[in-house]
Image (spheres, rainbow, N blue to C red):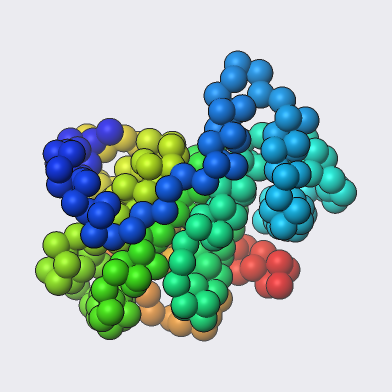
Amino acid sequence: MTTAAAQALPTENAVEDALMRSIRIPPRPSLLVDLQRELAKADPSPRQIARIIANDVGMSGALLKLANSPFFGAARKAKSVEQAINFLGINQCAALLTGLLARQAIEGKEADLNAFWEISARRAQALVFTSRKLRIAPPDIAHTFGLFCDIGVPLLMNRFANYAETYEDACNDPVNPFTAIEDQRYSTNHAAIGCLLARNWGLSPDVCWAILHHHDYRVLDDPATDDAIRSLVALSLLAEKGIQRLHGHSLSHEWEKGGAAACRHLGLSEDETEDLLDELNETFHTER
């Protein structure tokens, strides 16, 4: 944990409880509790995890579809949940399932949520791809962070009627941190709320703190911040740039704010960054 992280998140129970009451944060799903209990064992059983997943037919099918995506580089196609677990590994399958459970748990307007989850899935795919290419973060951690880093957005949308306008204003601000306008209007922001949900759901501490700081690009040049957290934040900027390119947008305000610092942290030259983004774009189109 970083000193900045510890200061940025509410530490008084009363403050945290007030936030939890004001902005509905879904409780940890029982299937995730069962999954995490098995994963906490000294020798987790793929067969037992497959049994847990098999209790939800929709979850089983979605896991197989994700497991066979080109982003996970599977040479063989998984035909069963247990095969998917054996091919990808327990931790990666757990990351996929956690994301699917989040999709079930978050409420909101269907059209808004479909667009949100599409971008979240793209970000998670990009983070898996870049983390493997650069060998800089475990793919399962990168995937979970990619799915959850903006999880506070639909929660704030449910709480505040004008949040869509706030979100657009933040997206179009070329200077200030993305979360600044949220803090000004609501005294909280989607990164802080997302971090609370991640903690509530028992996600990795690295994921929790990276969610909190994923728009605070000062951490990229801060040696006091854990390297794992800085790497995830840097990779999220690459993912953002890749998604913007996929959609035909040449300008990314977030990349302008933090891209140079991200490349410094990742040790990427300008040419290497362009090559990596080109490869990512090709993989996006293959996946389509």
Left or right: 53, with 128 as reference point? right
Q: Position of residue 10 (x, y in %)?
A: 17, 44
Q: Position of residue 202 (x, y in %)?
A: 43, 37
Q: Position of residue 244 (x, y in %)?
A: 47, 75
Residue at left offset 71%, top offset 72%: 288
253 and 96: which is toward the camera: 96
Residue 202 visible in rendering: yes
154 and 285: which is toward the camera: 154
Left or right: 263, with 275 as reference point? left
On the image, which quarter does residue 23 sit in? bottom left
Query: Quick check: 143 above or below 137?
Result: below
Query: Quick check: 37 above or below 168?
Result: above
Residue at left offset 73%, top offset 68%: 286
Residue 87 visible in rendering: no
In the picture as drawn, the residue positioned furthest to the top comes out as: 42
Query: Quick check: 13 above or below 159?
Result: above
Labels in figure, total? 0
On the image, which quarter does residue 61 sit in? bottom right
Q: Position of residue 162 (x, y in %)?
A: 26, 81
Residue at left offset 38%, top offset 36%: 205
222 and 24: which is toward the camera: 24
Left or right: 129, with 19 as reference point? right
Of the 4 image quadrants, the one containing the N terminus is top left
Residue at left offset 14%, top offset 39%: 12
